[in-house]
Image (tube, rainbow, N blue to C red):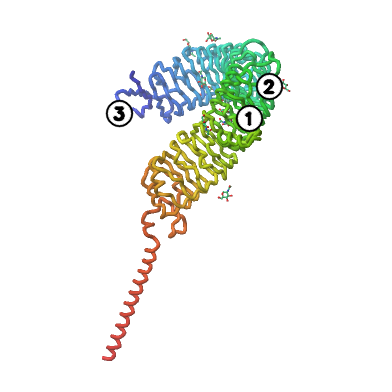
Amino acid sequence: MIRRYCHISHQLKVSTMAAFQLLFPLLVSCVVASASPPRHLTSCQVVQMDAFCSDLSLRSAPPNLPHGVQMLDLSRNQVHNLTQETLAYHTGFHHLNLHSNKIHFIQPGLFKNMTDLRVLDLSRNQLNVFALSKINIGPLTAVESLDLSSNGLYTGMSDYFLADSPSLANLSLSSNSITKIAQDTFSGTWSLKKISLHNNVILEIEDGAFDSLHNLTELDLSKNSITCITDFNLYNLKVLNLSKNSMELFQSVGSAQSYQLLSLDLSENKMPYFPFLPRQNVLEYLDVSRNHLRSINVSASSERRTFLNHLRYLDMSYNQLKSIPESFFCFMGSLEVLNVSNNCIGSFSITNEGLLPKVKIINLSYNSLQSLTFTENILQSLEKLFLQGNDLTTLDHQVFQRLPSIRYLQLQQNNLKICASEQKQQEAALTDQNHQHPPGCVSFSSVHSLRFLYLSENNLQTLPANAFANTSLKLLDLSLNPGLDMDKDSLSGLEHSLVHLLLRENNISRLNTDLSLLKSLKNVDLSTNQLTSLPMWDKESSIESLNLQNNNLVTVEYSTMLALERSLKTLYMGSNPLNCCSNLGFLHVVQRSAVVVPDIETVTCVHEDFSQPVNIEKLTEGMCQGSGTPMYISIILVLVAVMIMFGLLFKYCLLRKRKRIRSFRA
Ligand SMILES: *[C@@H]1O[C@H](CO)[C@@H](O)[C@H](O)[C@H]1NC(C)=O
Ligand SMILES: *[C@@H]1O[C@H](CO)[C@@H](O)[C@H](O)[C@H]1NC(C)=O
Ligand SMILES: *[C@@H]1O[C@H](CO)[C@@H](O)[C@H](O)[C@H]1NC(C)=O
Ligand SMILES: *[C@@H]1O[C@H](CO)[C@@H](O)[C@H](O)[C@H]1NC(C)=O
Ligand SMILES: *[C@@H]1O[C@H](CO)[C@@H](O)[C@H](O)[C@H]1NC(C)=O
Ligand SMILES: *[C@@H]1O[C@H](CO)[C@@H](O)[C@H](O)[C@H]1NC(C)=O
Ligand SMILES: *[C@@H]1O[C@H](CO)[C@@H](O)[C@H](O)[C@H]1NC(C)=O
Ligand SMILES: *[C@@H]1O[C@H](CO)[C@@H](O)[C@H](O)[C@H]1NC(C)=O
Ligand SMILES: *[C@@H]1O[C@H](CO)[C@@H](O)[C@H](O)[C@H]1NC(C)=O
Ligand SMILES: *[C@@H]1O[C@H](CO)[C@@H](O)[C@H](O)[C@H]1NC(C)=O
């Protein structure tokens, strides 16, 4: 297929266009005189039957549009009046894009003869001015998609555009000033499938306003002022967005008829109760986040229960829930994502076998959880559990061993203690016969599926030996636990799995765990500690990124750097009291190898000849070559030279004086 590029240009451009043609035989330029004022040089680009004339300060389409043009993009121009003339008397358009002009008048009946026009974009114009004239634009015979957004339209004005649009399937009236949807608003548009009324000020929807739209599947009413829907009866609707309204009640008609609704967004409203959803539903996505939910009361009688058997995503975050009864989840066999974060939930338990069998993600972060209860082999599919920002102190110590698929555990910002391995506990239990109470700690050993564990900000004091044995942790975050005392064997068992180890801000002065045993380790964050020396690494090290920022390192062993250099790609080293001249080995690594030091600006060292720390980039080997004594010697040499010169000068003067005395005598 040969693409034909065709330029429409003003006469002044003839010569250049001719040259263009010679150079590129495939480019055919169509140069015709333009009727627009000479100061408007127009140059649309034409690709096959599509003309692109966007952003050219045009008042109308160029009169020389190719015959049979199907798509015309006149967006971002200066069109005021939309008439046959403006469109250069073409009627064969399939797609007309007129957004962001100043259209305030449309010739009535203009689109009547455009029997191929499917897509009409009139967004961002001034059609409210036209609507004031109370003239109908006439039939939109074939138009399927119409965009009237951002036109300053208010209630009733859409009637002049929609009265006769039998083919219309997709309509946007978003960002206007509509306050009411009347019963007959959509009476001329019975094929509508999708309506957007986003960002208006709708307060009222008259009874039956959408009833005639049997094919309506998507309705966006987000960002309006709707306070309640008491008789929701759009059985064929699939997607309903009521986000950002003032909804206090959502209630479906209590019929036994089945609904097609798949997605309901009620986020950012004022709902005090869980919505009353259709009994017969296939709902998959429900968002009730950022509302005023205080409690979930599940009615006891199963007659009144709503089964949410198809629900896969439920977001109730940012509410005021204090608890969620387990029975609430009874008929949610398909749920995969449950978000109840940012509530005031004090305890959460799932103990009934078979509850939430498909749930993969539970987000309970930022609540006031003090207890968490799971029975053995519950939540078979749960992979990610987010529990950060709670008050968890004492947990049943085997709580995580009960979750057979758990991979990802976020426990930062709690108050947990970590148990020693099972072995140790059993030994302890044997010696201590009164071992009745839970140990007040939580165990991670033998949580076989666990890969990512976040334990920062837990006031952890100790990390016992084998704390993570029989897991295959890839990431372990122990940051922000100042004073953490790690047993030398605390990481044993992770030799072949651990890739990321984060020990930031732990006030560690000496690492007593041998990191070189961790053969898969790639990222190590030891920043903001009190380290005075680096652990030893051998040549097997696989570390790619090492963060040593903000420690107390004075010297870095050359052998350590040599061992690291083979795999190291990134090194953070700023804010350490390094000694300049005892770190030349390190300097070599920084200067010669491919290691990237992103914070090189803040890597400085102390040199006795300088009062301020020297940036490591400015340090040269010469500055350290036998400094100290040679400086002293050179001062002596200078002094000696000066003394010799003075001596010679003195001798010379003495000689001349004697000569003069001699001549007087003569
Ligand atoms: C637009 O059309 C109206 C009504 O036909 C007319 O009064 C007005 O002068 C026209 N404006 C321009 C800029 O052509
Ligand atoms: C529509 O077509 C008819 C006959 O083909 C013609 O008389 C009329 O002027 C056209 N109207 C417009 C608005 O193009
Ligand atoms: C409906 O119209 C909107 C706005 O013009 C557009 O973004 C969207 O792609 C259209 N959707 C369909 C299915 O035509
Ligand atoms: C509704 O959609 C069906 C199937 O797409 C179609 O056959 C029917 O004509 C449509 N109804 C209306 C009123 O557009
Ligand atoms: C509902 O509308 C809001 C606001 O326009 C938007 O942010 C949100 O993504 C929409 N919800 C869905 C499920 O698409
Ligand atoms: C929940 O409780 C409120 C007030 O106690 C009540 O009005 C509402 O009907 C109850 N909802 C259900 C589903 O039982
Ligand atoms: C709720 O949590 C889920 C899963 O963690 C997440 O995808 C979603 O964005 C969260 N909702 C809000 C409102 O942040
Ligand atoms: C959990 O939900 C909160 C919203 O409440 C969200 O901000 C956060 O990102 C979610 N956590 C994850 C890890 O998805
Ligand atoms: C790891 O698992 C094995 C076998 O399942 C067990 O014998 C051993 O005690 C466990 N190690 C620790 C430290 O829990
Ligand atoms: C950090 O450790 C030093 C001693 O090494 C101690 O004096 C200081 O109090 C510790 N700081 C914190 C926040 O634990």
Q: Residue 500's spot in the image, x, y percent? A: 48, 37
Neighbours of disc 3 within 10 Å: few (<14), some (14-19), many (20+): few
Q: Which mark is residue 19?
A: 3
Q: Residue 607's spot in the image, x, y percent?
A: 44, 57
Residue closer to the observer: 402 or 180: 402
Give the answer, above or below, for where 530 lies relative to 68. below
User: Which of the two residues, 471 or 138, is positioned nearer the viewer here?
Assistant: 471
Q: Comparing marks 2 and 1, which lies closer to the viewer? A: 1
State the CA–CA distance, disc 3 to disc 1: 78 Å
Mark 2 or mark 1: whose residue is earlier in sequence: 2
**Residue 372 marker:** 1
Q: CA distance from mark 2 to mark 1?
A: 32 Å
Q: Earlier in the sequence, mark 3 or mark 1?
A: 3
- Mark 2: give few (<14), some (14-19) or many (20+) Cα within 10 Å: some
Determine which residue is flagged by label 2: 249
The single residue placed furthest to the bottom in the displayed view is 665
Which of labels 2 and 3 is toward the front? Answer: 2
The type of residue carrying mark 2 is Leu
In the picture provided, is 356 more to the left or to the right than 120? Answer: right
577 sits to left or right of 297:
left
- Frontmost of labels 3 and 1 is 1
